[in-house]
Amino acid sequence: MLNQHEILETIRMIDQQHLDVRTITMGISLLSCAHSDPKFACQKIYDKITRYAEKLVATGEAIETEFGIPIVNKRISVTPMALVAAAAETDNYTPFAVALDKAAETTGVNFIGGFSALCQKGMTEADKILIRSIPEALSSTKIVCGSVNVGSTKAGIDMDAVALMGKTIKDLALRTADTGGFGCAKLVVFCNAVEDNPFMAGAFHGVGEPEKVINVGVSGPGVVHHALQSVKGQPFDVVAETVKKTAFRITRVGQVVAQEAARRLNTPFGIVDLSLAPTPAVGDSVARILEEMGLEVCGTHGTTAALALLNDAVKKGGVMASSHVGGLSGAFIPVSEDEGMIAAARSGALTLDKLEAMTCVCSVGLDMIAVPGDTTAETISAIIADEAAIGMVNSKTTAVRIIPAPGCNVGDTVEFGGLLGSAPVQAVHPFSSAEFIHRGGRIPAPMQSLKN
């Protein structure tokens, strides 16, 4: 039971330190919707989503009001669409994305994720169709998000898929040029993608998940930042312990909300993802946490070590507060969505290379990064390959959400608004990776894969 002190502390965290439940995400299996007739399949998809998630938003709002805990987003994740649409006799999966969009709009959720393909060891015909459909599908829908898993520690990296994703991202950026390439903000390329991630744009409902499930993502960078202000100048042992205790309190809030939502929706409780997900609001930044540890600017020497401590301490504290911890669980470093990261990138302290180094120890990877619009598809593919290699070798999830902003150059800023914030356009290396990408094939799995 929560005691009076913990209740008052939680109220302070909500009122003054930006604590919130970032998302309640309902995962829904669509495997039963597969059909050879694409129109019939799309109708089944719409019907099932709207039936299962009919009360999701209302339930989230009721919990928010009754408990006094902000719940920023209500979302849906579905079975990777390449698996569901594989039975359909069509060479374009855009209608499936349209069905998802309409269903999500009917239920009132903020985003729906799962226009996805899993091709870490190779692409099926359905995977290829889905990837080719991504530019049209994500540019013609409002709240559909997609992802493609191109590698894993067990399988290696499918470089043919990596090459195709570079071209796909370029095409999607051009199709959404009037919004700064916004379509690319709804697309993630993964290595070691997890099946229970509640955060967009990479959420999908894995094949090992139940028929439906409730996953919750909590967030509280501002709470951690505030806590560290009370231990200025003290050793890192104290810093780590402070973050652990704070992460425990944050996760307790998520656990309560997750269990209550699951009960009211008559849906199994899946996991709490205890990732620190920042926003563009001042005081809600992962970068400012790292600077509170003693760095003048996020991105300077020592940043990777500080992020490693933060990520580890968040996991250790959070795992004691929930019966089921999953998803990504750590610290996100999305450049456009973090006020401190934006400032560090603008100052020149935070470069693409430094961000890549930081992804070795953070929750995900290169996230919400804008690069010049004339960046080649091969360069984007090479960036994806580097990030996938980090994930593959280190047995962790890594991802790339990159926006080649049409018409923009280094030093420009791309405005997305809301939680997506604004992204300073960052420099990429001018030297070509084209010959490397054009080799194709598969990078073999590392020795770490031989664990059986």
Image (cartoon, grey):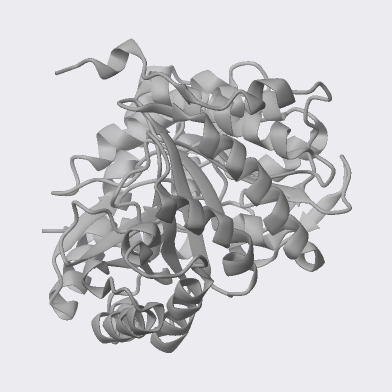
Choose between 47 and 398: the one closer to the eye: 47
Question: Is 153 displayed left or right of 184 in the figure?
Answer: left
Q: To which quarter of the image does residue 351 belong?
A: top right
At x 76% / y 66%, what residue is drawn? 179
At x 74% / y 42%, what residue is drawn? 343
At x 26% / y 45%, what residue is drawn? 326
Count numbered badges in the picture.
Answer: 0
> Where residue 90 sits: x, y (%)?
46, 69
Is 314 situated above or below 265?
above
Choose between 100 and 415: the one closer to the eye: 100
Quarter of the rendering occupied by the N terminus: bottom left
Quarter of the rendering occupied by the C terminus: top left
> Where residue 240 sits: x, y (%)?
37, 26
> Where residue 262 sits: x, y (%)?
17, 70
> Where residue 167 sits: x, y (%)?
67, 45
Q: To which quarter of the image does residue 380 belong?
A: top right
Q: Farthest residue in the front direction?
A: 89
Question: Is 195 displayed left or right of 283 in the figure?
Answer: left
Q: Is residue 17 visible?
A: no
Choose between 131 and 247: the one closer to the eye: 131
Question: Is 182 displayed left or right of 2 in the figure?
Answer: right
Choose between 433 and 242: the one closer to the eye: 433
Is 279 situated above or below 93?
above
Is 18 situated above or below 240?
below
Q: Is residue 298 visible?
A: yes
Is 376 situated above or below 71?
above
Q: Farthest residue in the top direction?
A: 447
